[in-house]
Image (spheres, helix red, strand yellow):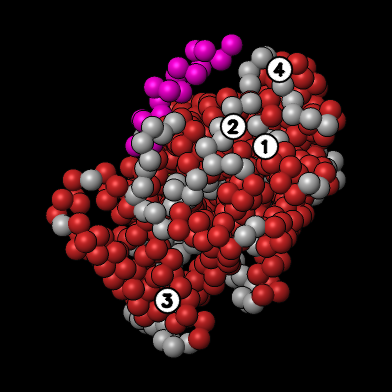
Amino acid sequence: MSSFQAPSQKYGIFAAITVLIIGPAFTVFQDGFIAFREQSFWFGFYGWLTVAIIVGYLVYLTFYLFGLLKSDSSKTNDEEKIPLESKPQISAGKLPPWEVGNLPPPPKFNLRNALGVIGPGAILLGTSIGSGEWLLGPAVTSEYGGFLLWLVPVSIILQVILNTEFIRYTMYTGEPIYTGFMRTRPGPHFWGIFYIVAAFLQLSWPGWASAAATALTALYIGDFPTTEHAYLIKIFGFIWFLSTTVIVIFGEKIEQTIEIIQWFFIAAILLFLIFVTVSFTSSSTWSAAARGVTYFGVLPPGLDWVIISAFIADAGAGGIINGTIGNWFRDKGFAMGKTVGYIPAIIGGRKISLTKTGKVFPLTPENKKSWREWWKFVSADQYGIWAIGCFLGMMLPALITLEFVPYGTKFDNQFGIAVYQAQYMSLATGNHLFWLVILLIGFWILYSTQLGVTDAFVRMVTDIIWSGSSRVRRWRGGDIRFIYYGVLCLFTLWGLFILLLDVKPLLLILIGANIAGINFAFLGLHILYINRKFLPVELKPPLWREIVVLLGVLFYGFFFVKALPGLIQQLFSFG
């Protein structure tokens, strides 16, 4: 174990392994060795893995915060070699070499500084709390009860580990993860095109704007929208989809503008959902939801695999969007991201020279210390903000659904997909105010997702083009803003074209979410490769993290394969 593995981490890993052994062993003790033949046992393993990671992290956090064990990671060997110190550049794969510089030290880690430094997790959370939380989660919960809620913590844990592996690369190099992918064989042109296509297939369907428009239409007509309101839904979808384009025009940094808006959305949405669930849901509903979270491996017969696969992919952020966390961390100025620049806004921003390639640091004692301090902020951002926020964002609407929507209800009115909870809650309480407020909350949830998705796609494509093409970097005097807003215009025109078609809002959501599942598989395998290939030994992820990422690849890949036949059938019959 490297010197970065403090005793507190060792005890956390020990606790996690203990849970991971005892949990499945208890199942075998109850059911005998026949349990190994059951599909539910192997899916239940993911549940115990989730519990193990949570317990291990809590043990680590307890030891770390209360000083029960002191870290030995500050010990350094005076004769320790400092690789790369004398070299001005480091060759790395199929793109130009990295420059070498010192890792900028972070501010002292405390609550005040953490609130000022973290932020990418809020952008990702605002993007995450959308279709999975407000549409697919309630649709699954209403039809299957709480039996599939165990998939929520499993998916979030798998995704947050994957997120931090993307961030690991960005912290060391100052590059978004997609630039790192372009450094591998067969080269930047292949991987640039591959991931742009993957992002297009997942994110280019403006289903979130269209679904948000169904909520506004319900507010406007005072009733459940149907096919006769399709034109009105298109009009509202046009307006709000275009508004996401307008928002990213203003500010000093585009990342900063998005972050401020998403913090507002998150606070308003989660506070209201907490108020509703605490005030209006019964203790039996809470018990049902709690039991559902522990039903590890339970997969009821007759599942709609298309919606289940979409549900688990969107239970966190979703595929390509998770990878974009590195872009936001770079622009926020985390670790080596502070040395390379950022993408400024067109109005209020100034021309910033974003380097064509990243910068890395030599492993000096001071840089190692700064690395460990930066990781505290990463943990606060991803575990404290994103993971907890995603869990609340999934479970609170599930509680509302279990309380107010009759068991077995199918969300089959695609033009009213964002209206079900408002309708049933207002009927159950006899209070028309809930009709208005729940529809508005649903609209803001879906709108914040469309805003984050728009920026994520455009930012990712911009960085791929910027890193991979010297000709484009010379265009317009090397001002990256023209690339960003050029891609944004093309993305907007495509989205408006899709909104003109008679494609139902839920189908747009299902397409993107299922593509996110297979994208997770590609991203997981690729990040395992590049972190092993390009990072120094002491900065590489520990083995347990690599195993979790690989299990995530298998998890999302399985559900995508199961859903693919049904998805193809829906695509060829959407008319």
Of label 1 and label 3, which has the lower sequence position? 3
- Residue 138: x percent and y percent? 58, 42
State if disc 1 and disc 2 touch (CB < 8 Å): yes
Where residue 358 appears, as percent x and y from the top left, is 54, 49
Name the amino acid, label 2: Phe
Element at label 3: helix
Q: Secondary structure at mark 4?
A: helix
**Residue 562 horizontal side relative to residue 415, left or right:** left
Residue for badge 4: 227
Q: Secondary structure at mark 1?
A: helix
**Looking at the rendering, which quadrant does residue 130 occupy?**
top right
State which region is magenta: 557-575
Query: Which amino acid is tagged 1?
Result: Tyr
Q: For mark 3, what is the residue?
A: 59
- Residue 359 covered by magenta stretch: no
Residue type, mark 4 in image: Thr
Q: Are marks 1 and 3 in contact (CB under 8 Å)?
A: no
